[in-house]
């Protein structure tokens, strides 16, 4: 799949403010690959240092690929998923 | 909104988010609906039961209360009788003891004892369940305790879809409803749920009627009747039983009061074999009640009966002992094999 066509769902903007940790996990995915999403739709919930945050869709389109599964770990700067814009 | 053109719901929610969505919706529709409990405002509920609600509705309508169950549940009864629609939360169902007079003598009986002059349109929510080493006073389900006493409806959702529909119905009901949500099904980060409870949930509001059990899996060889967390354990057991050629029907009660006898009796008429699974204590509870009702109405249909429930002991703190006395998936499968 060509990365230049898809929009990245980046984790950094949702990183909890006071968190010192540079790692987190994805606790729950609310949509599956192939699902249609609107701009701002809830995609998944992440947890950094026991603080939860909601990750929203940056654009409308189709959730093309989930890069970090439930219970999967990520670090600052990582991409959680990619969306193919509508 | 995440939907295909055919209207299939693509968005899944955890059970806690489904409950919150129903509450938020009802609160927007009716100013009289409000939520009170311990750590429900900024904390959002220790099991996420009110996550995000304080941000939308403020401290007046998402109200933190002191650690005084008898006071705030009593206040909820009073508010309900005065025309409000409170949702009051017991942080752990195990805490009902200090407030039981307010629950079973006031909330449950004031309508009756006033000759119908007042009604109590209140929802009493409570977190139930164990399996995470919280010991005897923080792990109980107590389904039987609440179901036994007259004057209150009792609902126990097992999936996000059911949780939202039952919550809408509970808030709209003009009589008291005890809404018991299992901690392990909520889908919170520090206590992950099994796969089952996270389901597609429509964004529109919808209700699920009380007294309507749901056949979560059809089968011909045995009827497994259960509720809450054990719906998912029964479905797991059914998968492994299928490999051995045993086809299990799993009935999710969803409501204890009123109880859907019909669905259970129809199923037993088909399979002849009944296994009742309950996380609450074995004696004088849900399992005995279901078996008694089937025996009363359909004794001729019954060829075998098994009960799977918690042993009649306080829930231990030691993990090995807790696992021993609470029902496991394998216990359900063994009980089914006993009936075949």
Image (cartoon, coloured by chain):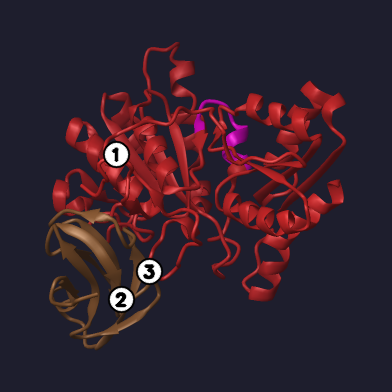
Chain colours: A brown, B red
Instruction: Provide the residue span drawn in magenta.
Output: B144-153
Residue A77 appears at what percent x and percent y?
18, 85
* Mark 3: few/some/many CA within 10 Å (<14, 14-19, 20+): many
Residue B189: image tag: 3
Nearer the N terminus, badge 1 or badge 3? 1
* Labels 2 and 1 share a subunit: no
Q: Secondary structure at mark 1?
A: loop
Label 3 chain ID: B
Q: Secondary structure at mark 2?
A: loop
Residue B7: image tag: 1
Q: In the figure, B301 relative to B91: above or below?
A: above
Q: Secondary structure at mark 3?
A: loop
Task: Residue B120: name its quadrant.
Answer: top left
Residue B54 appears at what percent x and percent y?
19, 52
Q: Are marks 2 and 3 in contact (CB under 8 Å)?
A: no
Q: How much space separates mark 1 and mark 3, taking CA atoms?
A: 30 Å
Task: Residue B322: name its quadrant.
Answer: bottom right
Which residue carries the number 2 mark?
A: A67
Side of B235 relative to B94 (left or right):
right
| Residue at the image position 70 percent from the left and 71 percent from the top | B321
| Residue at the image position 38 percent from the left and 59 percent from the top | B47
């Amino acid at each position: 799949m060509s990365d230049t066509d898809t929009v990245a769902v980046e984790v950094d903007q949702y990183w909890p403010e006071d968190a010192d940790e540079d790692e987190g996990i994805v606790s729950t995915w609310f949509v599956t690959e192939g699902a249609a999403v609107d701009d701002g739709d809830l995609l998944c919930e992440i947890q950094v240092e026991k603080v939860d945050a909601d990750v929203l869709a940056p654009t409308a389109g189709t959730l093309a690929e989930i890069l970090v599964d439930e219970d999967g770990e990520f670090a600052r700067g990582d991409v959680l998923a990619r969306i193919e814009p509508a | 909104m995440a939907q295909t053109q055919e209207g299939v719901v693509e968005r899944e929610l955890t059970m806690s988010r489904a409950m919150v969505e129903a509450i938020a919706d009802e609160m927007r529709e009716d100013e009289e609906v409000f939520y009170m409990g311990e750590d429900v405002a900024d904390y959002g509920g220790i099991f996420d039961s009110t996550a995000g609600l304080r941000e939308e509705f403020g401290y007046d309508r998402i109200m933190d209360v002191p650690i005084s169950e008898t006071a705030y549940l009593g206040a909820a009864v009073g508010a309900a009788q005065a025309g409000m629609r409170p949702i009051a939360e017991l942080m752990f169902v195990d805490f009902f003891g200090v407030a039981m007079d307010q629950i079973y003598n006031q909330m449950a009986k004031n309508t009756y004892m006033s000759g119908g002059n007042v009604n109590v349109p209140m929802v009493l929510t409570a977190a139930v369940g164990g399996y995470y080493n919280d010991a005897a006073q923080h792990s109980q389900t107590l389904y039987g305790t609440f179901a036994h006493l007259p004057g209150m409806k009792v609902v126990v959702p097992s999936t996000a879809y059911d949780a939202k529909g039952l919550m809408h119905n509970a808030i709209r009901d003009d009589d008291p409803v005890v809404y018991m949500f299992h901690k392990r099904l909520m889908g919170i980060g520090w206590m992950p749920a099994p796969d089952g409870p996270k389901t597609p949930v429509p964004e529109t509001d919808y209700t699920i009627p009380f007294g309507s059990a749901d056949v979560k899996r059809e089968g011909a060889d045995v009827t497994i009747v259960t509720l809450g967390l054990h719906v998912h354990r029964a479905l797991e057991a059914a998968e492994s039983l299928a490999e051995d050629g045993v086809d299990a029907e799993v009935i999710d009660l969803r409501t204890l009061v009123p109880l859907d006898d019909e669905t259970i009796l129809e199923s037993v008429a088909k399979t002849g074999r009944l296994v009742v699974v309950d996380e609450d204590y074995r004696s004088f509870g849900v399992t005995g009640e279901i078996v008694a009702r089937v025996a009363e109405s359909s004794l001729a249909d019954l060829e075998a009966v098994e009960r799977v429930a918690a042993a009649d002991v306080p829930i231990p703190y030691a993990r090995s002992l807790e696992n021993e006395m609470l029902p496991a998936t394998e216990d359900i499968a063994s009980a089914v094999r006993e009936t075949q």
